[in-house]
Amino acid sequence: MIHAELLSRQYGIPSSKKTDNGAFYAVRDLSFHVRRGEVMGLLGPNGAGKSTTMKMLTCFLPPSSGDATINGVPLKDDVRIRQQLGYLPEQAPLYTDLDVHAHLAFIASMQGLPKATAADRIREMARLCGLESVLNRRIDELSKGFRQRVGLAASMLHDPVCLILDEPTTGLDPNQIVEIRHLIRRLGEEKTVLLSSHVLSEVEAVCDRVMIISDGQLRSIGTTDELSRAASGESRLRLVLRGDVSRFTTAIRSQHSTCSVEAEVAATGDDVYQLMLSCSDPSVHLGELAFQAAVSAGAVLLEMQPQSTSLEDVFHQMTGGRS
Amino acid sequence: MNRVLAMMFKEWKICIDTPLGYVIAVAFFLASGYFFSSNLFLIGQADMRNWFSSLPLLLMFFMPALAMRMLADEQRTGTFELLATMPLRTGEIVAGKFLAVLLQITLLLALTLTYPLTLALIGDLDVGQVSVSYIAALLMASSYAAMCLFASGITRYEVVAYVVGFGLLLAMFLVSQSLPLLPPAMQDTVMLLSPLAHYESMIRGMLALEDVLYFLSLTGLFLILTWFSLERRRWM
């Protein structure tokens, strides 16, 4: 659905970093692919190039080099691209002097919808986004949550195949965030959604796949599980064991030298210990190894819990700790 | 064309739904009424010539006010990004905004038709001259609207848009005022470029093609410059 190929955008502002003949690259050689009916999260610290990427895909800014296609349409065919797209820029810009209905009607006419169709679509989007009760209210009287929903409704009026949402939950309260996430999730069942955020829990909750960018470059792409595995490079198992820890550790090492037992987790008393078993060899089944080692050490395994690297850790690792 | 009209009506709706439009209209009629009545009662002349002569001065203050928020506001609030990512051309945005300003000033001028109607009741009105003068006023207003729209396109701030628009119109005004100070060789050229000189020639009652073409060209030139000002993001 969305194919980006070596997309770059440079500005003429000299910068101490990322310079190439004095130019500043907001995005550099970004290539990715978002599948039809997929919710893709675009994750990155502030200033990573998320918004610039979205502005290029929506033809607001032309790329300095590279190209992209959306539903097979290249970026240079900007009018056709925009027909395919629904775009919600950051902070949902709206005509606050108009009422909700007038705003949506204006957007519908800009999208070229015939009047009768526009009336039906406005009704349908108002229902989908929960705007029926505020259709005749002026936008500047609405709460942030409602404004965000007006922005979403406006971006979907022309029934686009692809939605590009730039930080759609910024500034919302926790209840509103949950509502908007549900809405995006529902939309993602039918449409391709590219969603930017620097809220990790949001991306985890809403997106099928995640793309992490930093300093304008792609750092990683995949499902959150894939990213976690790629980031940690090892599998880990948290254990609660009763028995002799040193015999257990020796048993582990004798079976697999690549595996280690971290003793950083303190004893909890009554000869019960919490341990972290990790192994860089992906072919080793840690559960089986722990069981056999416990048997040979005469220890009892009370708990076993596989540990995954959180998206926070992945993000931190990929972006070099920038926020 | 539907999009251009929709843009125009959206601006019209904002204009009548917010106090700014009414404040500008009231101030315009106070100032315009002053020029009209002082001519009628103080000088005792039942003609519109002096009122039309004062119109460029009035428009210098009011046109930037009508146009200042048209594009600056869209850029400041981010709605321009919304417009620029919908399937419409920058030219359609410029045309819709221009027509919106033109609609507002045309309505203001239309309401001043009460002046010639009053004069027709109490004196002998030269209908031909007044009609040509209104055409001249509209043509000049359209070129002023384009200039002020350009001022609104180059900034995100309404105040800056007003000051730049006012500055452009003031420059046009000063060019014609400085004519007597210029060497005779330059006077003809400057007169050819001065909107006021063309306007003055029209409000004498002569509808000359060169004057009409001059105002249409000036309007077109500034609409193109407005288009460039909105497209500049592409080359930055």
Image: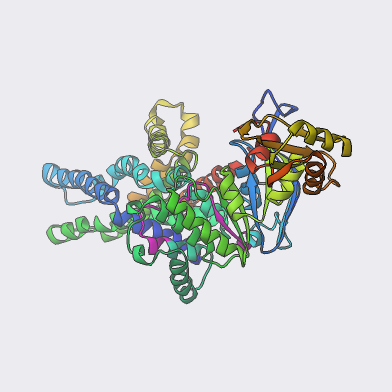
Q: Quadrant of the C terminus of chain B?
A: top right
The reply to whether the magenta stretch includes residue B178 is no
Seen at 18% across and 44% down, the residue is: B34
From the viewer's perspective, tell me whether residue A240 is left or right of residue B207: right
* Magenta residue span: A82-103
From the viewer's perspective, tell me whether residue A280 is left or right of residue B231: right
Which coloring applies here? rainbow
Quarter-of-image position of residue B229: top right
Q: Which residue occupies the extreme top position in the image?
A: A16
Q: Is residue B113 above or below residue B44?
A: below
Q: Which residue occupies the extreme bottom position in the image?
A: A116
Residue B217 placed where, x, y %? 51, 49
Q: Nearer the viewer, residue A124 or A25?
A: A124
Seen at 38% across and 49% down, the residue is: B141
Q: Is residue A257 above or below residue B50?
A: above
From the viewer's perspective, tell me whether residue A51 is left or right of residue A256: left
Can residue B138 be seen at all in this image of the molecule?
A: yes
Quarter-of-image position of residue A82: bottom right
Seen at 38% across and 67% down, the residue is: A132
Residue B94 placed where, x, y %? 50, 52
Can residue B132 be seen at all in this image of the molecule?
A: no
Q: Nearer the viewer, residue A52 or B228?
A: A52
Counting every numbered tag in the picture gives: 0
Q: Nearer the viewer, residue A164 or A118?
A: A164
The reply to whether the magenta stretch includes residue A85 is yes
Residue A184 placed where, x, y %? 55, 59
Residue A204 placed where, x, y %? 61, 50
Q: Nearer the viewer, residue A104 or B235?
A: A104
